[in-house]
Image: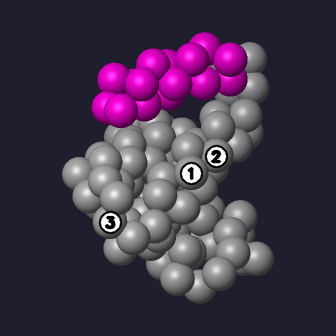
């Protein structure tokens, strides 16, 4: 399944602007697995937020970062639930190093 299709199915209820920003970030990275791709996209969104600290224009990017990390965890749970805890720990460590 393509990334955009996967996202469309799981973000139907989200506001259009957020859906568009999440998709934009997701389509601008590449990784081996969907969960890794979404986590990397979330990190890219978080990096943008941190580089514009205090700037309200980054609010949508902050929401996208949150959504992408949540979606990365969901994708991991669907791909390989037995590795979810390990994956979540890696995502958390990576996020901590960026903050």
Which one is in front, 28 or 92?
92
What residue appears at the point 64 percent right and 38 percent down from the top-left corner?
A: 73
Residue 75 position (above or below residue 7)? above
Q: Position of 59 compared to 14: left or right? A: left
Furthest-bottom residue in this view: 16
* Label 1 – label 3 distance at C-alpha: 17 Å
Q: Please state the horizontal and vertical placement of residue 49, each as a whole percent of the image.
A: 34, 55
Residue neighbourhood size for the residue with mark 3, other residues' Cα within 10 Å, grouped as few (<14), some (14–19), many (≥20):
few
Disc 1 vs disc 3: which is toward the camera?
Answer: 3
Is residue 85 among what the camera can see?
yes
Identify the disc placed on residue 66. Answer: 1
Which one is in front, 49 or 80?
49
Residue 98 position (above or below residue 16)? above
Disc 2 vs disc 3: which is toward the camera?
Answer: 3
Label 3 residue SS: loop
Identify the disc placed on residue 70. Answer: 2
Magenta region: which residues? Answer: 84-99
Judge whether residue 21 is colored magenta.
no
Q: Which residue is mark 3?
A: 55
Residue neighbourhood size for the residue with mark 2, other residues' Cα within 10 Å, grouped as few (<14), some (14–19), many (≥20):
some
Judge whether residue 98 is colored magenta.
yes
């Amino acid at each position: 399944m393509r990334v955009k299709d996967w996202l469309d199915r799981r973000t139907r209820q989200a506001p259009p602007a957020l859906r568009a920003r999440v998709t934009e970030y997701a389509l601008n990275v590449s990784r081996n697995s969907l969960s890794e791709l979404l986590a990397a996209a979330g990190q890219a969104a978080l990096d943008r937020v941190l580089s514009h600290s205090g700037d309200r224009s980054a609010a949508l990017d902050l929401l996208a970062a949150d959504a992408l990390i949540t979606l990365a965890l969901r994708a991991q749970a669907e791909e390989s639930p037995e590795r979810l805890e390990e994956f979540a720990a890696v995502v958390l460590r990576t996020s901590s190093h960026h903050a």
